[in-house]
Image (cartoon, rainbow, N blue to C red):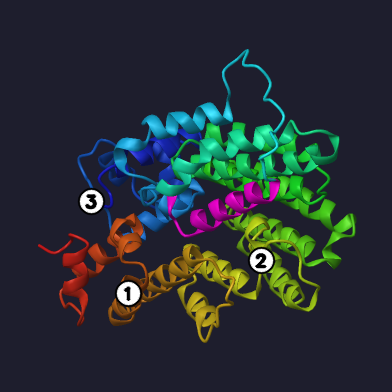
Amino acid sequence: MATQDLGQSLRRLRRLASLTQEELAERSGVSVDVIRQLEQRRKHSARLPTLHALANGLGVELTTLLGDPPAVTADESDGPRFVAVRRAVMPVLGAPDPEPPGPGFSPERLRERIADGWTRYHAAEFDTVMTALPDLVSDARTAAAAPDDGRAAGYAALAKALQLAGHVAVRMGKTDLALTALERATEAAGQSTDPLLPAMIVNSVAWTYQRQGRLQDALHVALHAAATVEDGGHTGTADGLKVWGGLTMSAATSAARSGDYDRAARLMEGAEAEAARVAKLPAGSDSRMVSVFSPSSVRIERVRLAVQYGRPEEALNLAKGMRLSKDTPPSWRTWLLLDVARAHTDLGDAAGAVKTLESLRRVAPTWLQHHTLAVAIVRDLWSLPHHPAGLRPLAEFLGVAD
């Protein structure tokens, strides 16, 4: 069920934000009685507008309140594979330094494996990524022990492998481990010769802060890193502009969640204008290893912020007629469809929501089936007195039908 842990999540996020039930009620517009019933599990679900209001009052994504779709199977949250990831991020104290790579070691092959890991991450293949991560990090540590002429490249590989580990940890709900991985990724990036790598990792740190409700911290680090990239003259390259754009979008998200939607909109509009330059610049490095930034990605994020902060008509206008670039990751495409469905639902257009969810089911059935927000939307539609055509198959598919 989409909200089976809603009460526990609500209580945890409220305490993390240092809010009393009364303060959350005032900030969200949801009655103290409803909040109390949810936290005490006397009430196990809520209508979508109530969930939106609570998430906004807490300053988090709705999916953070509901719970993300499972990154891996439920019994793996602290299972052997995740323990192996922990050990890779935090080697045992007193362990000997890695040996330099042997004659058969291929830095190019290692970079390709890390890039493939990022591709699979963006495709939400979290099981596969988590299985591969320990060896990736271990081999990257070996690469970083290479002689002087290859050491910088080895540290760059280690930084990207640890950054990937940080992202997986966030998806598993282990944000403290994520920050440890990202701190170590930052250290490794500083030993590389890539001036953009530290800023890329800052973007991941900002995202992790957002997940922890540290919105001002997230805003500060993203804006500071974006300014550093710009002041360093890097936005004249495709890679540099992508990194700057990713940081600017992250800052906009933090601003919106802090209640400053106007500032977020200005940042996003500026980012979208700059994104048009990416295709005009000489091709950069492997796009799998650089921040996601294109006109499509900015527009998708603008849609997400608009629907998240109660502007469904604006969201649908932004999404209308969008043509996604070929480098748009699959996970971004699925999020766009889900946000469009949310916008239709918020406007009372049940038929439009169902049509969009049917499209989402065709392109990502497993993702849809496990996504807590998708289930919440369909449950809301199912509670209506008149069901639009196509709703019953969706409700049965998601286990919502009576």
Out of 79 and 273, give the one closest to the viewer.
79
Relative horizontal placement of residue 388, taking residue 152 as reference (left or right): left
Q: Residue at x 69, y 61 (%)?
A: 286
Q: Residue at x 20, y 40 (%)?
A: 42
Q: Which callout, 2 or 1, points at the residue further toward the start of the chain?
A: 2
**Other-residue count near label 3 (Cα within 10 Å), few / some / many at <14 / 14–19 / ≥20:** some
* Viewer-side label of 1, 3: 1
What residue sits right under mark 1 in the picture?
Answer: 362
Give the answer, above or below, for where 242 lies relative to 228.
Answer: below
Out of 362 and 309, give the one closest to the viewer.
362
Residue placed furthest toward the bottom:
321
What residue sits right under mark 2 in the picture?
Answer: 293
Give the answer, above or below, for where 325 lies relative to 265.
Answer: below
Q: Residue at x 50, y 53 (%)?
A: 121
Label 1–label 3 contact, CB within 8 A: no
Q: Secondary structure at mark 2?
A: loop
Q: Position of residue 104 (x, y in %)?
A: 66, 40
Q: Is residue 20 visible?
A: no
Residue extent of the magenta highlight: 107-126
Q: Position of residue 277 (x, y in %)?
A: 77, 76
Q: Secondary structure at mark 3?
A: loop
What residue sits right under mark 3 in the picture?
Answer: 1
Q: Position of residue 108 (x, y in %)?
A: 68, 51
